[in-house]
Image: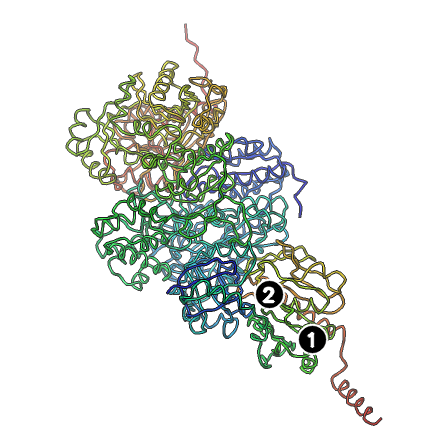
Amino acid sequence: MQARLLLEDGTLFTGLGFGAEGQSSGEVVFNTGITGYQEVLSDPSYCGQIVSMTYPLIGNYGITRDDFETVAPFIHGFVVRRHEPIPSNWRAQYSIDGLLKEHGIIGISEIDTRMLTRILRHHGTMKGILTTGNERVEELQERLSVTPLMRDQVARTSTKSIFTSPGERERIVLVDYGAKSGILRELTKRGCDVVVVPHDTTAEQIRRLNPDGIQLSNGPGDPKDVPHAVKMIQELLGEYPIFGICLGHQLFALACGADTAKLKFGHRGGNHPVKDLATNRCYITSQNHGYTVLEETVAGTKLEVTHINNNDRTIEGLKHAEFPAFSVQYHPEAAPGPLDNSYLFDQFLDMIRETKRNNPQKPRQAQLAASLRGELQYAQK
Amino acid sequence: MPRNNKLKKILVIGSGPIVIGQAAEFDYAGTQACQALKEEGYEVVLINSNPATIMTDTNMADKVYIEPITLDFVTQIIRQERPDGLLPTLGGQTGLNMAVELARAGVLERENVQLLGTQLTAIEKAEDRDLFRDLMRELEQPVPESVIVTTVEEAVVFANEIGYPIIVRPAYTLGGTGGGICADEVELRETVASGIRYSPISQCLIEKSIAGMKEVEYEVMRDANDNCIVVCNMENFDPVGVHTGDSIVVAPSQTLSDREYQMLRSASLKIIRALNIEGGCNVQFALDPFSFQYYVIEVNPRVSRSSALASKATGYPIAKMAAKIAIGYTLDEIVNPVTGQTYACFEPTLDYIVSKIPRWPFDKFISANRKLGTQMKATGEVMAIGRTFEESIHKAVRSLEIGTHRIHLKDAGELTEDVLKVRLQKPDDERMFLVAEAFRRGYKLQEIQDLTNIDWWFLDKLEGIVAFEAQLRGATILTKEQLYQAKRKGFSDRSIAEIRREGGHSTHTNEYDIRAYRLEHGLKPVYKMVDTCAAEFEATTPYYYSTYEVENEVTETDKQKVLVLGSGPIRIGQGIEFDYSTVHAVWAIQKAGYEAVIINNNPETVSTDFSTSDRLYFEPLFFEDVMNVIEQEKPIGVIVQFGGQTAINLAAPLTKAGVRILGSSLESIDAAEDRKKFEALLRELNVPQPQGSTVTSVDAAVAVAQGLGYPVLVRPSYVLGGRAMEIVYSDEELLTYMVQAVKINPEHPVLIDRYMLGKEAEVDAICDGDTVLIPGIMEHVERAGVHSGDSIAVYPPQSISQELQQKMVDITIKIARGLNVIGLVNIQFVIFQDEVYVIEVNPRSSRTVPFLSKVTNIPMANLATQAILGTKLTDLGYTEGLWPEDEYVSVKVPVFSFAKLRRVDPTLTPEMKSTGEVMGRDQHYAKALYKGLVGAGMRIPPTGSIIATVADKDKPEAIEILRGFYELGYNIIATGGTATALEEAGLRVKTVNKLSEGSPNILDLIRDGQAHFVVNTLTKGKAPERDGFRIRREAVENGVVCMTSLDTVRALLNMLETINFSSRPMPVLAKK
């Protein structure tokens, strides 16, 4: 079955379709990871995007129930050089073709994906439309030009209701802007009592959950499309330790007064070097973002740059000068990608413990009594 | 961290001669390292005994020592040079072992030399089996159950506990020398005994077999600031059990999910950190195909063969980065030379698939055991790049030059089911082809997997290839779409034509038709760049591979270009020497103002370093692939004379396709290679040649041989490294030979020459069309009958008269002119009864070019290239004739890899057997020879025992030589006949039992280490069961010097007589 991918600039790729049939459009991006296509497919941060893999053979080891980063993928199309229909791995349960069919996602293979990467690198990410039909090119072009890019990806990918993943240690409120399962996995692995809340949860609602710390998740799209999150962070900053990842990092920066902008073609892959400015150590990180915090807008805020990308020097990590809050642009939860940065979760938990030590709370009973008495006094007036 | 300014002078140790397990990859690594250090302004001192390397060119280091890599010589150089630092990790196992030895001997401390990069403790922890296992346990990294033994009994006890099969790995050996998988106690006893002998510390690891698991490798780098990266991971097509150097390997891994990939990546980083390595390191894993269980198999704390492969596979120059790390830089501050805008601290990502296939010497060593195990047997390898596995593996197969261009063996169809099954089960060099054969016979994939344990994914791809071939075969008309699909799967035009012929079709049945059809439809490959980053960043590396897709990335330039063809994989007879010349040709082309374009497929070499040429095409040296590059680049011409027989063989089809060959034309090549034309030419020039004739039938052969009189020299017409050349002494032997030779090379007739037992000599000359420059004459120590590549060669000649030398010079000039040579020519002579005969002329670069260039200080490949491009030698200050002799004597000594090839007879014959060479150079011949022999690994004790068993015809000569040893104080041990003869000659001899005479016999003596030299000359009949064969093998396997030519023995004696003080009684005064 023939499939075609038309880019905004008029470039047309003709290949073979796999997965679902139909038509779908979105922002076309490329990911340079060699392994980890299942995690990429199911990473909610790709919501609304047509994802092209630079590694040519995709599907080799199949799909397994254990490696999903969310229940259902949100991508709008999958582009590969060669789709391997028969996987070989002891954990493989079905093929990538089966997965895409199940979720109505169109795949295209047998196209020159390196050419596509080079176009995107040169011109920046652009819109594209994927079809398995016989539409005329003009028709597709017309459709592409009238289809706006999505702005509500966070609402689409975030959980609709609160749920908990109980643990016996610190209570972490994980604000889900389209979170990868990996973040929850890393927190529960460390014994955290995690409460996952929707993206539009207010500061007040979060306070009622009595967290020890707040984890801002990754998520798709432009951080400026989620102003309510910025407001929430501003209200809680200083009150609770905060750790932001990816979109969470950008939201944290916006909340502190910095600004963000779109990158030409983003960072998507598992090989990006990030330098820790405190130690001069370089870490290989997993990344997936199209926006970045602008360096020049950090000056004058209470933010300090802690990490930069060793290649393009963009900001990769921030911390607050006064409050226990920090964030990274990359993915310490990996999946896919190197596991070198999971220590950041430990750092977060250490920060929580340290905050507690520095602000010893009165014994719960006394505190409760005091507050209840205060209320009584108020009522008596 | 910036560079270390305390260091001023750095010593680099090379890897010595090419042997199986240690090949050209260390010239590549060493060259990169020297360049990197010089770039940083350090004074570089280099020691390497191998003259056939780029790294030993005097422009690579400030001082180059071509001396034996032994404790004595290296210590001497350290004393002389007083370096501040020593870089040990780029010279393979040889360099590493040398560093350990220097440190242990206290030399480094005493001379105040700092070990750079990886520290001694790390080396020991990685190399010593015991320390390694302790470390792994500490790191919670699983290793297979094992025990360290120093005796055979300990091994047997352990094996009885955990059961067979058992793997034996000797400590500190190269390419797994002496190791193997043992199925029972008999095998175990034998293997452990030899393993202990090979291990310099007499230690073996006895290990539970994890054969059948997936084998995966990671190439890792670390700097002093603890930054760690993985450059590349690789997956072996063959499961654990076959040495990784003998495995077909793909990069990146194909069947590992991200979880598995990251699990092993993390383990690799944990290990390199624990070892505190500063530089490169290689970690090998076995991964259970049915769980997350894995084992660490091995860690190499140095740059290795795999790192050369990883460098070429990714574009990331590991050795260069390792050198920079060793002098203090950290990865995050070194610019990635591929992109020029990003840094070395990142992990390369591939957007193609790389296949490596080893090149084995079994075409030369017909009697060798082809089974693959834990001991490496391959001499070289090819690499290919494609966008699919099918494309990549097909390209690799046609790069191999093994007579097939697809996954198909001509004779495989004749194998019985039983044999096929056994060969699928027990891996040998042809297994991948046999898997394809099994699919052709209708085997089910599961069946093949059960037999081979090869991963389903690879088998599925091979099944797909076979199925596609069947489709092609079945189609009456080859459609454009089908052709396109075939090209996308990497099928060559020739393969497609062959498959069509198999299908009995009448159209498109030869490669030229397919090619025309393809071009008619615009089906041409495009070229993509190897850029370390999957196109994420703009790169400027001119490193390309072909594929059938849409976008072509080659940028046009308006400069004139010259294409140089490389020499492909390293094999016996065509080694690193040709890469040396190729690289020099490239440099000369660039200097002459052209752009140099190179095609080659050998990942180990300097020529395939993308920074060597202006454009590197990593492609098969196959007509179609070369033509495609020519059409892309439109060079002014192609130079074929530096790429050995590989490139020379392409001259004919390229000329036919209208391509201009630069330098000696196809006509000249043909006149030298075609026997009839060659004979006619020599007659015309009035140059003597051994009588001989060309025959095409067995009967004719017998008639000719009888006419000439035995012994005669027989060989197929187109020869490479003396392949299938033999001296035969009777009709019977001739008949046996004819059956084999004709089978080996059916398209070409057989040559029969009179065999002249005389001294051999050779020259390399350069001709620009007018002037013939002869840099030097090399005299061979071993007489005619031993292949020139296996002979010790001496420059300048020590025992050839001026008159004869002049004759050679005159003949060389005549032939060079007569053949219209433009560029290099190599001529081999035999001196018989004071007459000079020409035995062979090769109008191309030869094996001796690097050696002769170095000892005469004439950059031969460079001059030849300039001549090819039109410069006259006289304009460069050279004159006709023999260049004045150097006052030093230089000796080239061959090095063999017999220890790695069971069942191969170490006797020197007209068939070339050596894998590498070393050079010894000194003011005196004896000293130069000593250096050469020691550099080649010969242990020469000033006193000791010699075992002699010589054929009757050799006895008179042997007695005289042995008397010399006897007088120097050596003990002579001999078997029956030889002993009697020696005693009759007045020598006191210890007689030892022949094999048939019961124990203890001659073999026991060798095994017990009682002999220091074995002299054994060939008796008739070459079947391995012969006693002589067993004696020679026993010597090889015990590391005892074994000499099979009396000329070698005589040279050794003369050397010993000269360098040792001898004591003589005072002459008695005559009484009057």
Name the residue beneath numbered marker 2. A332
Question: Residue B14 vs residue B900: left or right?
Answer: right
Colouring: rainbow
Q: Is residue B813 above or below residue A267?
A: above
Viewer-side residue, B106 vs B453:
B453
Q: Amino acid at mark 1?
A: Met
The image quarter containing residue A3 is bottom left
Of pointers 1 and 2, the one earlier in the residue sequence: 1
Q: Please, which residue is most extreme toward the top here?
A: B1072
Q: Position of residue B321 (x, y in %)?
A: 57, 46
Q: Position of residue B250 (x, y in %)?
A: 42, 53
Q: Amino acid at mark 2?
A: Pro
Instruction: Report how far apart the C-alphas of labels 1 and 2 lie in the structure.
Output: 23 Å
Are the residues at dot 1 and dot 2 in contact (C-beta closer than 8 Å)?
A: no
The image quarter containing residue A126 is bottom right
Q: Name the chain letter of the residue that bears numbered label 1.
A: A
Label 1 packing within 10 angstroms: few (<14), some (14-19), many (20+): many
Residue in the picture at 48% in, 22% down? B924
Residue B343 shows which numbered tag?
none
The image quarter containing residue A287 is bottom right
**Which quadrant of the figure contains the C terminus of chain B?**
top left
Q: Is residue A347 above or below residue B664?
A: below
Question: Residue A363 vs residue B403: left or right?
Answer: right
Residue B937 seen anywhere in this rendered image of the structure:
no
Viewer-side residue, B871 vs B767:
B871
Q: Position of residue B596 (x, y in %)?
A: 47, 36
Q: How many marks?
A: 2
Name the residue beneath numbered marker 1. A232
Residue B526 seen anywhere in this rendered image of the structure:
yes
